[in-house]
Amino acid sequence: MAQVSPRYEQPIATPLRIAFLSDTVVHVFNEDSAVAKLGFSTDTVRRPGKSTTVALLASMVAPGAGQIYNGSYWKAPIIWGVGYYFISVYNQQNKLYKQYRTAYLATVDSTSPAGDPNVMQLRDFYHKQRDTFGWYLAIEYIINLLDAYVDASLYNFEVSPNLQPTAEMRASLRIPL
């Protein structure tokens, strides 16, 4: 009897779909095969992209508008709330700074050019606080712009639920000399 060499069969790539047919025969289909495409619907849906320019300009004009444009509606109230907090604290600290600046200038006269040191300390404290919250507001505005831009850039980023490993394996070996 002559020996017959086995016929070459291309390996099935992952991911695999298993279908149970009515006659209890099990078929395994490659996800890319035409049969699998006819029998199964895919989980991924391609959405039209978002413009990074529109998202960035919208957030520049009205913070949170870029997030609304991108469909991240939950981020807009957070941006508005944080911005409102920073603006209100900035205004409060500015009012106190102006109050203590006026009080300090009232204590400065020709006999005492240094003025009241306690009032000067409070004036400087509120001045620093006002400036700090001004920086916080500027940083929040920049983060708002970056978030709108990145969210629009990654709007079509496909996150597939398929976490199966592929049939391909790659290895590299480096030998130090």
Image: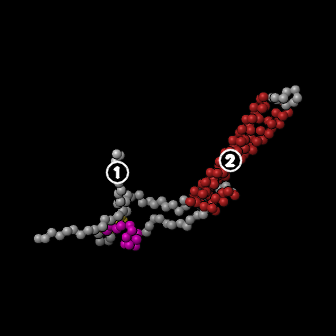
2 and 1 marks in contact (CB < 8 Å): no
Mark toward the viewer: 2 or 1: 1
Q: Residues within 10 Å of mark 2 (few under 14, many from 20)?
A: some
For this orientation, the residue located farthest to the right is: 110
Question: Picture quarter containing residue 8?
Answer: bottom left
Task: Say whether residue 177 is magenta.
Answer: no
From which residue to which does the magenta span run? 27-40
Q: Position of residue 75 (x, y in %)?
A: 61, 54
Residue at (77%, 35%) from the top-left corner? 123
Please, is residue 101 above or below residue 1 in the view?
above
Q: Amino acid at mark 2?
A: Leu
Q: Is residue 39 visible?
A: no
Q: Position of residue 143 (x, y in %)?
A: 62, 51
Q: Mark 2 — residue?
A: 137
Please tell me which residue lies in front, 154 or 41: 154
Question: Picture quarter containing residue 126?
Answer: top right
Residue at (74%, 38%) from the top-left corner? 127
Q: Mark 1 — residue?
A: 173
Task: Say whether residue 36 is magenta.
Answer: yes
Residue at (35%, 64%) from the top-left corner? 13
Q: Secondary structure at mark 1?
A: loop
How many tags in the picture? 2
Which quadrant, please, contains the N terminus?
bottom left
Q: Is residue 80 left or right of residue 9?
A: right
Mark 2–mark 1 Cα distance, whole angstroms, equals 51 Å
Label 2 or label 1, whichever comes before in sequence order:
2
Q: Amino acid at mark 1?
A: Leu
For this orientation, the residue located farthest to the top is: 111
Q: Position of residue 30 (x, y in %)?
A: 36, 67
Please tell me which residue lies in front, 177 or 128: 177
